[in-house]
Image (cartoon, grey):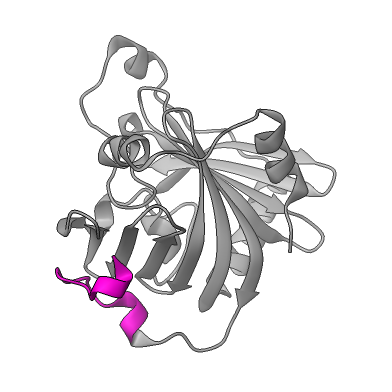
């Protein structure tokens, strides 16, 4: 699967691959999956706090279709393209096993691994041999890793847009609307997740587009083991 619209947008903008320092700066403030958005709010953030959308019968039907699709995913592997305004463009591979398991590997020259083992999310800088960890509930994509994905149980929908062949759902954590939101972009007919964007209260974005998606099949437990320091030299 190739998401040409996402790839084309990035290419047209002429985004260069990030340096390690630029990427780590972004990951430190707003990682792909390793931490939730900051709770320290500016006046702008307060003004931009998302609110619940008044949902129509068609909206509820589309949300049920998206829930059914996401809950039907047991395992997934894919390539991804990530773009942020502060770190530019990077690439890698993502592995997911629901509930609670996730692994993100960045392509060289970046030496970064992010792993969710069901309890914590670990961010491992291979070159510095340093590990940072946060509770898995702090991840902005945690609701996708839950045993049952729901857009109503602890999650509030702030937007739902339909375009020919596409469906976009925006949502936030119900108890912490000030913490930012996530946008999910699906292809439609049939429905299929293509992209997500994480938006923090300060307006920073990380956009992740999926390619070559494979659903189903076994994924080794070792993929989701918490990283340990001192990886072999060939992995550095």
Up the image or down, 231 lies above or below 136; here it is: below
- Where residue 24 appears, as percent x and y from the top left, is 30, 41
Apparent side of residue 45 relative to residue 67 in the rendered image (left or right): left
Magenta stretch holds residue 55 = no
- Please count the marks in the image: 0
- Where residue 210 appears, as percent x and y from the top left, is 61, 57
Magenta stretch holds residue 234 = yes
> Residue visible at 75% across and 43% down?
5
Which of 71 and 221 lies nearest the eye of the viewer? 221
- Where residue 166 appears, as percent x and y from the top left, is 76, 47
Residue 86 location, quadrant: top left
- Where residue 229 appears, as percent x and y from the top left, is 14, 68
Apparent side of residue 221 relative to residue 124 in the rendered image (left or right): right
> Residue visible at 38% across and 67% down?
103
Up the image or down, 34 lies above or below 17; here it is: below
> Residue visible at 82% across and 49% down?
165
Residue 31 location, quadrant: top left
Residues in magenta? 222-236
- The single residue placed furthest to the front in the displayed view is 233
Which of 218 and 55 lies nearest the eye of the viewer? 218
Up the image or down, 205 lies above or below 228; here it is: above
Which of 129 and 117 lies nearest the eye of the viewer? 129
Identify the image quadrant of the N terminus.
bottom right
- The single residue placed furthest to the top in the displayed view is 43
Apparent side of residue 187 relative to residue 106 in the rendered image (left or right): right
Which of 59 and 167 lies nearest the eye of the viewer? 167
Identify the image quadrant of the C terminus.
bottom left
> Residue visible at 45% across and 85% down?
219
Up the image or down, 53 lies above or below 49; here it is: below
Helix, strand or loop for the magenta stretch, by majority: loop
Residue 173 location, quadrant: top left
């Amino acid at each position: 699967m190739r998401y040409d619209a996402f790839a084309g947008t990035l290419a047209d903008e002429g985004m260069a691959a990030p340096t390690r320092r630029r990427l780590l700066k972004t990951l430190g403030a707003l990682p792909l999956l390793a931490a939730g958005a900051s709770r320290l709010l500016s006046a702008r953030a307060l003004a931009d706090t998302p609110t619940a959308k008044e949902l129509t019968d068609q909206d509820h039907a589309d949300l049920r279709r998206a829930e059914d699709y996401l809950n039907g995913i047991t395992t997934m592997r894919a390539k991804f393209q990530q773009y942020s305004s502060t770190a530019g463009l990077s690439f890698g591979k993502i592995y997911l096993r629901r509930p609670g398991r996730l692994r993100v590997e960045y392509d060289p020259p970046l030496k970064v691994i992010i792993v969710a083992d069901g309890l914590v999310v670990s961010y491992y800088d291979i070159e510095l041999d340093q590990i940072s960890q946060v509770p898995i509930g702090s991840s902005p994509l945690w609701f996708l890793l839950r045993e049952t994905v729901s857009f109503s149980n602890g999650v509030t929908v702030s937007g739902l847009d339909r375009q020919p062949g596409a469906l976009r759902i925006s949502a936030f954590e119900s108890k912490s609307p000030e913490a930012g939101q996530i946008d999910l972009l699906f292809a439609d007919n049939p429905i299929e997740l293509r992209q997500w964007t994480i938006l923090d209260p300060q307006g920073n974005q990380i956009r992740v587009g999926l390619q070559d998606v494979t659903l189903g099949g076994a994924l080794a437990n070792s993929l989701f083991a918490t990283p340990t320091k001192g990886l072999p030299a060939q992995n550095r």
